[in-house]
Image (cartoon, helix red, strand yellow):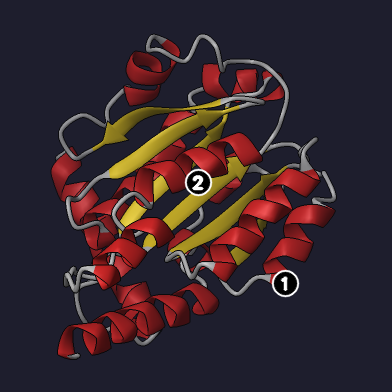
Amino acid sequence: MSDIFEIDKEVEKVRFVLEKGGIDHVVRARVGLNLDVSGSMADMYKQGLVQRVVERLLPLGLACDDNGEIDVWGFSNDAALACVATRQNYKNIVDQEMMDGDLDHVLWKGTQYAPVIQSNLDYYSKAGSPVANFLRKLFGEQQERPLPVINYFLTDGENADVRETQKLFEEIEKNDIQIYYVLIGLGNSKYDFLRQSAKRFPNVGFVSVNSLTEFLSDETIYEKLLPSELCAWLKHEHEEGEDDEHH
């Protein structure tokens, strides 16, 4: 059985979960993945578990992303866009693009969330930034509403920059930036900040994962990665986009 056939089977599972969530059409959204590369994650990379994370999330990109891609960041107390995962290059991408790429200044340090969230915003919000929107309105220019973004955020530890991260989540909400964070907390940490953020912000969700190995082999993984709140948010963003096009 070929890899492509297996991936296509997983894509169908993703679409089935979306249909159950009330989305019965092709979803147009960008998909991003923030991967913790702090020191405590080193063993998971050596064991190949993080490569499996990319493989399990790739069908989400193929089902949702307009380009069939996943934008992948590495973060510790710094952050950098590491690679773009596609159907063609996903095999061994973690070793080839992240471990042997340009992440030396990021690898195996502390844990902060704000640098990578800011990097996400810089990357996705250029066309849809408040300044750009203001200028378009000023000059009467019409432009399509930016595509919504689903960003999966994998970490095994709590962050040292709670205040800075909270300010960024507040900025995202205040400026109506179309990005939804699925925060995945690994292991036994309490993740009080992540849990509170998921309760407070409508575009933030939290998934607790005790064992990454078990999570990756879970037949219901896409139901966990596409919770009802995210599906409702996606539906709302698409309806708003359609309304914008009609005005």
Give the percent coordinates (x, y) of residue 230: 48, 73
Q: Residue at x 51, y 79 (%)?
A: 228
- Residues 92 and 199: in front is 199
Disc 1 packing (10 Å; few <14; some 14–19; many ≥20): few
Q: What is the secondary structure assignment of the residue under circle 2?
A: helix
Q: Nearer the viewer, mark 1 or mark 2?
A: 1
In the visual, does 227 lie left or right of 132?
right
Q: Is residue 174 above or below residue 212?
A: below
Residue type for callout 2: Leu
Label number found at residue 116: none
For disc 2, the marked residue is 216
Q: Is residue 15 above or below residue 74?
A: below
Residue type for callout 1: Arg
Disc 2 packing (10 Å; few <14; some 14–19; many ≥20): some
Spatial CA distance of label 1 from label 2 is 28 Å
Q: Quadrant of the N terminus?
A: top left
Q: What is the secondary structure assignment of the residue under circle 1?
A: helix
For disc 1, the marked residue is 200
In the visual, does 68 lie left or right of 30?
left
